[in-house]
Amino acid sequence: MRIMGLDVGEKRTGVAVSDPLGYIAQGISVVKREDIEDLKKIVSDYDIERIVVGLPKNMDGSIGEQGKKVLAFIEDLKREIDLPVLTWDERLTTKEAEGVLLRADLSRAKRKKVIDKLAAVLILQSYLDSQRTKS
């Protein structure tokens, strides 16, 4: 089962997909936040069966302003794509991605180009790992 992971930001959405066995997440692109047509194409091209969207929460677990925007995006996504859409707690994922890129010594310009995609990979990989531990 191939799964797509999304890191929804203010302007861009990072996209990752799993391998067919659901073990490894791979970043594939960054699309404009409102461009659901690009996501539909990815769903078709990769034969996606489920979508996992990172849900930003406050440290106390509550849903803040950005979390509400992501939930609204998910509702739009569900109207356009007939697949199960799950949310996944993404607290600190972007910070983790930033740390990985800083350790890789990427310039600020290069980090900006890949951070959303890497955050999507981290979200999806966390979800995939959790599913294996349930078995």
Image (tube, helix red, strand yellow):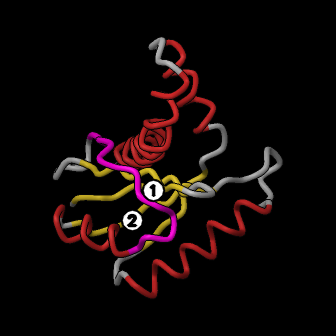
- Residue highlighted by disc 1: 6
**Residue at x-position 29% and y-position 51%:** 17
Decide: marks 2, 1 in contact (CB < 8 A)?
Answer: yes
**Residue at x-position 23% and y-position 58%:** 2
Task: Provide residue 130's location: percent of width, then percent of height.
Answer: 44, 45
Task: Provide residue 15's location: percent of width, then percent of height.
Answer: 38, 52
Q: Nearer the viewer, residue 105 or 109?
A: 109
- Please state the extent of the stretch shown in magenta in the rendering: 24-36
Q: How many marks?
A: 2
**Residue at x-position 63% and y-position 32%:** 95
**Residue at x-position 54% and y-position 74%:** 74
Q: Nearer the viewer, residue 13 or 125?
A: 13
Furthest residue to the bottom?
A: 79
Residue 26, magenta (yes or no): yes
Q: Amino acid at mark 1?
A: Leu
In the rendered image, the vertical position of residue 86 relative to residue 11, given as above or below = below
Q: Considering the whole magenta stretch, tell me its main secondary structure.
A: strand
- Residue highlighted by disc 2: 51
Task: Provide residue 96's location: percent of width, then percent of height.
Answer: 58, 29
Say whether residue 87 is left or right of residue 61. left
Query: Which quarter shows the N terminus?
Result: bottom left
Q: Amino acid at mark 2?
A: Ile
Q: Nearer the viewer, residue 117 or 83?
A: 117
Give whichever of discs 2 and 1 has the lower sequence position: 1
Mark 1 lies on a secondary structure that is strand
Answer few, some or many: residues within 10 Å of disc 1's Cα (few below 14, many 20 plus, some between 14 and 19).
Answer: many
Mark 2 lies on a secondary structure that is strand
In the rendered image, the vertical position of residue 36 relative to residue 27, given as above or below = below
Answer few, some or many: residues within 10 Å of disc 2's Cα (few below 14, many 20 plus, some between 14 and 19).
Answer: many
